[in-house]
Amino acid sequence: MPYRAPIDDLLFAMRRAAGEAAFAPGGLYADLDAATAAATLEEAAKFAENALAPLDRVGDRDGVNFSAGTVTTAPGWREAYSLWVKGGWNALSAPHGHGGMGLPLLLAAACTEIWNAANISFALCPLLGQGAIEAMEIHASEALKSAYLPKMISGEWPATMNLTEPQAGSDLAHLRTRAERAGDGSYRLFGQKIFITYGEHDLSENIIHLVLARLPDAPAGTRGISLFLAPKFLPGPDGRPGARNDVRCVGIERKLGIHGSPTCTMSYGDTGGAIAFLVGRENEGLACMFAMMNNARLSVGLQGVGLAERATQTALAYARERRQGRGPSGDPAPIVEHPDVVRMLLTMKAQTAAARGICYLTAASLDRARRLEGAQAQAAQERAGLLTPLAKAYSTDIGCEVASLGIQIHGGMGFIEETGAAQVLRDARITPIYEGTNGIQAIDLVTRKLRLSKGAAVWREIDDMRDDIDAMAASNDALFVAMSRRAAAAVDAFERATDFLSATPDPRGPETLAGATPYLRLFALARGVTLLGAGALAAQRAGDAAAQDRIVTARFFADNLAVAAEGLERAIVDGGDSVGAGLALLSSGGD
């Protein structure tokens, strides 16, 4: 079954994340009424379904070709990228100053989900550019902005992130790429970067590389990292690409999935030094890069949501057609009538909806942080910071889990490439790894985000979840009252786990770190069950045509998924000792 963007579900999730009043005159999104949001998503869906989705299997089958430093993308990709640029999609949420449309991140989040569901390998190229644009807007000089941002925002010059080196993956303190000052205010870069997505390709006339490097007199560790801009071609006096810079692709990776996306090894300074320009200030590059990484982490979470949605659509269509076993009439029955298949499908559907809700809530919080002022903006920024690890880690974990269930529903045919179910899992498997592994997201949550404003941010989130529970309990509807009890149990478990971790004397001690990943999942279950339950109640009250669908999905999440909360709490509180024992065993060479 070809992917179809679930426009009604996306609009519903947007309204729930922002609040209905946000789209009214004078609201947070006064520049985006509901009709415009719907029309934009419809156009994004047309582009995804007609231009991107047909190329997804082509990219998976043909991959990319590397020869003598040149990377050629799969057939049809250059034409699709040209349509992307002409459609103005790259400029959707970029600021007005250099050609952006300045539309909300929430709208861009919904579009990002659509494009990645249709063709994640293609969508990876512009995804990284969005973070680069934000880093440039915040930290670059006016001269650099004028020279590069208009082309980056239009998509004519896509950007890359150059962090990883063979000896420096998640731990950038060991980074070796070096920068040397030139007499004219520019710099020269020397070194090698690996795993660079779209580091080289034939989609555009130029590529802008944002590169982390170390100056000779820089302090040790991450305090001595600077951020530089190094274009593939240096702009000439007319602003068009001129001389070739000393940066080249020296190889590409052969990967489990995302075959249509080139993953490159980049070499800087083989013939005298790559000309580069400082972004921000010397030795403050990591702070600059985090503007890119935080944006990218939400986008990667949306990749998980999109792939989960696609896997769910594909599995449901197959389950309705495939006949096995006997139905009431004695004839072979569609497998969608078998309870265990229904359980798997509802697991896929409910997890996807919960992850979407968390991601859109994160995007709406980022919009509030940008559009409001004072204490309201600060609280919104802290909420976005708290939720970003959930958006990235939970959504990509369930992207893999849902894609795996999709294969299971297909049975043996899911293991066969022609159904497309296997590709979704292969493509999804990278998402819990890049842009900060999900383990790192969990560590960030328990060591830093949990302590924002001395813990006030997480307690505000718990209060918000309890407001949702109270609304369900006050409905006097037996289904919602029952859901409220399940939700309350999950939030109670999350609150107790939060108390436990907050009281540990060492935020980075083994007791805290051992519980980090279960704590992130527990948080996601508590937040997911309250979002889905309150959303289903709102849909019922509004007479939403999909209200029954939303009620069934929320009820399944409450009865079958959220009930894991108390077990996760026990793992957080009591599991540290066994992890410590395992550490002693495994580090000593034991089996």
Image (cartoon, rainbow, N blue to C red):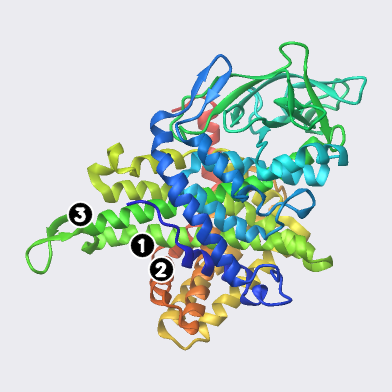
Marks 1/2: CA distance? 7 Å
Marks 1/3: CA distance? 17 Å
Residue at the spot of label 1 = 346
Mark with earlier residue (3, 2)? 3
Residue at the spot of label 2 = 553
* Mark in front: 1 vs 3: 3
Mark with earlier residue (1, 2)? 1
Q: Residue flagged by tag 1: what amino acid is it?
A: Leu
Element marked by disc 3: loop
Q: Where is residue 6 in the image (x, y as percent from the top left)?
A: 45, 61
Q: Are marks 3 and 2 in contact (CB under 8 Å)?
A: no
Taking the view exactly as shown, the residue that stands out farthest to the front is 238
Q: In which quadrant of the rendered view does residue 433 lie?
A: top right
Taking the view exactly as shown, the residue that stands out farthest to the left is 330
Task: Kindly tell me whether residue 290 is visible in this rendering.
Answer: no
- Specify whether 319 is left or right of 498: left
Residue at the spot of label 3 = 322
- Specify whether 565 is left or right of 107: left
Q: Where is residue 7 in the image (x, y as percent from the top left)?
A: 48, 63
- Specify whether 397 is left or right of 234: left
Q: Do the residues labelled 1 and 2 touch (CB within 8 Å)?
A: yes
- Specify few, some or many for label 3: CA neighbours under 10 Å numbering under 14, 14-19, or 20 or more: some
Q: Position of residue 168 (x, y in %)?
A: 66, 26
